[in-house]
Image (cartoon, rainbow, N blue to C red):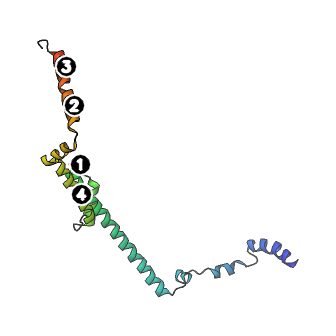
C-alpha cells in the first residue's frame, strides 16, 4: 500500500522539481564520449583517428573506381564516336592521371572489338553466306528481280 501511495504522489512531485530526483539521471549519463564507449581518453582518440583514416581510404578507393569507370566510358565514346561527357572528364581530372581501366573491362572491350572486326571483314561476310540457306537466297533474289521488273513495266511505257 505504501508503494502505491509513493508512486502516485512521488512521481508528480518529481516533475515539478521539488523532489530533486533529476540529479540521479544526470550522473548516470556521462558527458565524456570516451567514458560512454568504455575507453580511456587516449584509446578513444586513437579509435577516432583510425575511423577517420579508414573513411579517407574508402573515399579514395571509391573515387578511383569512379574514375576508372569514367575512363572506360570515354574509351567507348571514342570508339563509337559518341559525344564527350564533361562530367567524365572532370572525374578523371579529380582522380589524377594515374587512372587506368581495369584489365577485366579491357578484355571485354577487346573481345567485342575483335568480334566486330571479324564481322566487318570479307572473311566474316563469307562465313555469314555459308550459314545462309542457298535455296532461301535464290528465292529472295528471284523475288527481287520480279519485283524490279514489275515496277519498271509500270513506269516505262516502252517495256
Depth check, mark 2 against mark 4: the one in front is 2
Quarter of the image where the C terminus is located: top left
Is 114 or 29 nearer to us in this picture? 114
- Could you say which quadrant of the image residue 134 lies in? top left
Viewer can see residue 69: yes
Task: Tell me the residue that label 2 is attached to.
Answer: 139
Depth check, mark 3 against mark 2: the one in front is 2
Q: Secondary structure at mark 3?
A: helix
Cα separation between marks 1 and 3: 45 Å
Residue 154 circle label: none
Q: How many marks?
A: 4
Is 87 or 17 nearer to us in this picture? 87
Depth check, mark 4 against mark 3: the one in front is 3
Q: Are marks 2 and 4 in contact (CB under 8 Å)?
A: no
Compared across the picture, whether 73 is left or right of 126 comes to right
Residue at the image point whose x is 78% and y is 71% from the top: 12
Task: Tell me the residue that label 3 is attached to.
Answer: 150
Q: Secondary structure at mark 2?
A: helix
Task: Tell me the residue that label 1 is attached to.
Answer: 83
Is 116 or 45 nearer to us in this picture? 116
Task: Tell me the residue that label 4 is attached to.
Answer: 109
Q: Earlier in the sequence, mark 1 or mark 3?
A: 1
Q: Earlier in the sequence, mark 3 or mark 2?
A: 2
Amino acid at each position: 500500500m505504501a508503494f502505491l501511495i509513493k508512486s502516485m504522489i512521488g512521481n508528480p512531485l518529481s516533475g515539478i522539481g521539488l523532489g530533486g530526483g533529476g540529479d540521479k539521471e544526470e550522473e548516470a549519463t556521462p558527458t565524456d564520449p570516451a567514458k560512454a564507449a568504455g575507453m580511456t581518453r587516449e584509446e578513444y582518440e586513437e579509435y577516432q583517428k583510425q575511423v577517420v583514416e579508414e573513411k579517407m581510404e574508402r573515399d579514395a578507393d571509391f573515387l578511383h573506381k569512379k574514375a576508372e569507370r569514367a575512363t572506360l566510358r570515354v574509351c567507348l565514346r571514342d570508339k563509337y564516336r559518341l559525344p564527350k561527357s564533361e562530367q567524365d572528364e572532370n572525374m578523371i581530372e579529380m582522380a589524377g592521371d594515374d587512372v587506368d581501366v581495369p584489365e577485366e573491362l579491357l578484355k571485354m572491350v577487346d573481345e567485342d572489338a575483335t568480334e566486330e572486326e571479324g564481322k566487318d571483314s570479307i572473311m566474316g561476310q563469307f562465313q555469314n553466306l555459308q550459314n545462309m540457306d542457298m535455296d532461301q537466297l535464290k528465292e529472295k533474289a528471284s523475288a527481287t528481280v520480279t519485283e524490279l521488273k514489275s515496277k519498271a513495266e509500270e513506269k516505262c511505257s516502252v517495256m
